Amino acid sequence: MNAIKFRTKITNPNHLSYGEIVEVEWLDLKNKRITFNGVATALGFGIVEQANDGEFKLLQYR
């Protein structure tokens, strides 16, 4: 059985990844919060960001 994966569209203009669709790394249903790797740096590493309820739109993709 495959794990269910989620992507999200960031809707808060204060995030560096605003308007982007990113893969969700951690989904906290109790507190309605997500953690994701955001904008990639010059070295190829993503900046870890968090978004709270109302700052993202969750999309199931697998």
Image (tube, rainbow, N blue to C red):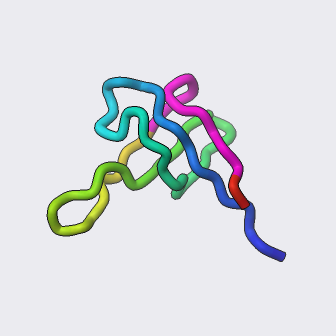
Above or below for 10 versus 48: above
Above or below for 40 versus 27: below
Image side of residue 52 versus residue 47, left or right: right
Above or below for 8 versus 12: below
**What x and y, as percent, mark residue 21?**
49, 45
| Residue sitting at x 78%, y 73% | 2
**What x and y, as percent, mark residue 8?**
56, 43
Decide whether residue 35 is among the magenta residues: no
Q: Determine the image quadrant of residue 49.
A: top left
| Residue sitting at x 52%, y 55% | 23
Q: Decide which of 62, 53 is in the foreground and name it.
A: 62
* The magenta segment: 51-60
The N terminus: image quadrant: bottom right
Q: Determine the image quadrant of residue 31.
A: top right
Total count of labels: 0
| Residue sitting at x 35%, y 24% | 13
| Residue sitting at x 17%, y 68% | 43
- Prevailing secondary structure class for the magenta stretch in the rendered image: strand
Image side of residue 57 versus residue 19, left or right: right
**What x and y, as percent, mark residue 19?**
42, 34
Residue found farthest to the bottom = 1
Q: Determine the image quadrant of residue 14.
A: top left
**What x and y, as percent, mark residue 20?**
43, 41
Decide whether residue 55 is among the magenta residues: yes
Residue found farthest to the right = 1
Image side of residue 42 versus residue 4, left or right: left
Q: Decide which of 48, 16 is in the foreground and name it.
A: 16
The C terminus: image quadrant: bottom right
Image side of residue 15 versus residue 35, left or right: left
